[in-house]
Image (cartoon, grey):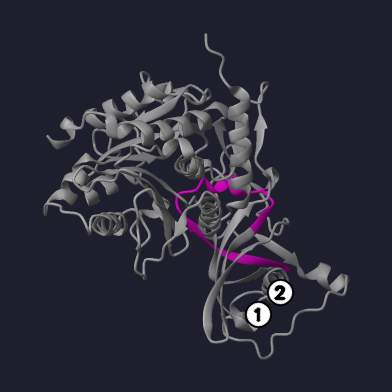
Amino acid sequence: MKQFPIQQARNLVNEFFEFVAKAVSPFHVTSLCKEKLTKSGFTELNETENWKLEKGGKYFFTRNLTTIVAFTVGQQFDPNNTGFKIIGAHTDSPCLRLAPVSKLDSNGFLQTCVSTYGGGLWHTWFDRELTLGGRIIFQKDNVFQSQLFHYQQPLLKIPNLAIHLTTDRNSFAPNNESNLRPVFAQEAYQTLTGIEKPKTEGQTSFENKHYKYLLNLITEQTGIPTSDILDIDLYFSDCQPPSYFGLNQEFISAARIDNLFSSFFALLAITNPESFTEDQTFINMICLYDHEEVGSQSAQGADSSLLSNNMKRIYDILSNSTQTSTDSFYKAIQKSFLISSDMAHSIHPNYSDKHQQNHRVKMNEGIVIKINHNQRYATDGVSSAILRVVAQSAEVPIQDFIVRNDSPCGSTIGPLQASNTGIKTIDIGAAQWGMHSIRETAGVVDGYYLEKLFVEFYRKYEKIDHKLLGI
């Protein structure tokens, strides 16, 4: 039996750990992706400016600084024989967001008002040391600007209620409005230690919305005067760093595995030189979207015209000086293929009855094809067959997943992208435990499998017979 390259897999996980620890908001995810792409020779584009694209070129652009699209143009690009090889994922995860007016106090404790974002397992946010990160919007010299912010020390906590004070000791169902209130400081301690209360006279309307203590932290770290700040987009995150666990250290534990695991390995794949061969005529692309966890209906979400518009823009620019038929772009669309990569539910040993008995997928045993005949996933027989051919070539094992008929099924960007673009699409993912928990679990091996599958997809897809796609 061929020995599995476990050290290579761990090296990839270590890279993911470094990424996810810094990626505390979609703004940070996009910034980290831009840094990686730039180092890999990609050129940044701006949607509001004219683009100049060339064969063999590598490019990326962002929208709202929370969605990022990167693409490479085949060195043998031919507008009459081309298509798009796309991997889609998302940059957002369920979390708590700082409310527009965050000042809150109760019985001598300073707290912050929050908004829930997405469908989080909110009970997992209790008794965790939390901090804040996101984007600061400010005005300098009459110019609107933004800057990233991440306070890297424990700052807040949502304390649990003691078991002696609960009426039902066997269940815990917090009220999302009254119980999800992080504690920020204690007035008595500030009085005892002589900490001076910040003056509020002459504050702007924005400054009156948030504790001066919090705004001072932002100023100390960013150098932006409080009076210049116009607004803040801040996300709560767990301070605990990612880690391995298990007898053989075969599991990984981290925040935001859903879906930064997919986003990170898609990024590695498109920047991997092996994905970019000299004989390619197609366009390799990744689309990492914001707002998947809340329905994708935004200008930067997967249910927007972002992908359709920019595929047409890319195609038109590249084929401008070439003789093409009027329907060449639409032929290219029908030759294209989109992998929607999101996480999948690994069999849970304590709740195995929650999983369909013939489709109990596991971490560290291969990438999961996700199927739902009610179109919660975009997979069909053709897209599944194509992916299996690519996986076989890459020597990546494949598992099949469906939900029980008496269970609801989540969804992904897959059906949205398929219906908006007309591109054949498949939904896949790596298996995990605890989806939407503040701290999720995945397998060490699956990052290796995911990147290997993505690279092989970029290398081999256009060599596959596409006749079934046009039927």
Q: Is residue 448 visible?
A: yes
What kind of residue is marked 1? Thr
Is 147 part of what is drawn in magenta? no
Q: Position of residue 240 (x, y in %)?
A: 68, 46
Residue at position x 52%, y 52% in the image: 33
In the image, residue 263 above or below residue 45: above
Q: Is residue 399 visible?
A: no
* Quarter-of-image position of residue 243: top right
* Quarter-of-image position of residue 235: bottom right
Task: Look at the image and give the residue range highlighted in magenta.
Answer: 107-131
Residue at position x 18%, y 45% in the image: 80
Q: Position of residue 284 (x, y in %)?
A: 36, 44
> Which mark is on residue 194?
none
What kind of residue is marked 2? Asn
In this figure, which residue is indicated by the disc labeled 2? 216
* Label 2 SS: helix
Residue at position x 41%, y 40% in the image: 276
Q: Seen in the image, is 18 located left or right of residue 333?
A: right
Quadrant in which the C terminus appears: top left
First-in-chain label (1 vs 2): 2
> Which mark is on residue 226?
1
Instruction: State if disc 2 and disc 1 touch (CB < 8 Å).
Output: yes
Residue at position x 34%, y 31% in the image: 460
Q: Position of residue 379 (x, y in %)?
A: 28, 34
Q: Seen in the image, is 26 located left or right of residue 251?
A: left
Density class for disc 1 (Cα within 10 Å; few <14, some 14-19, many ≥20) is some
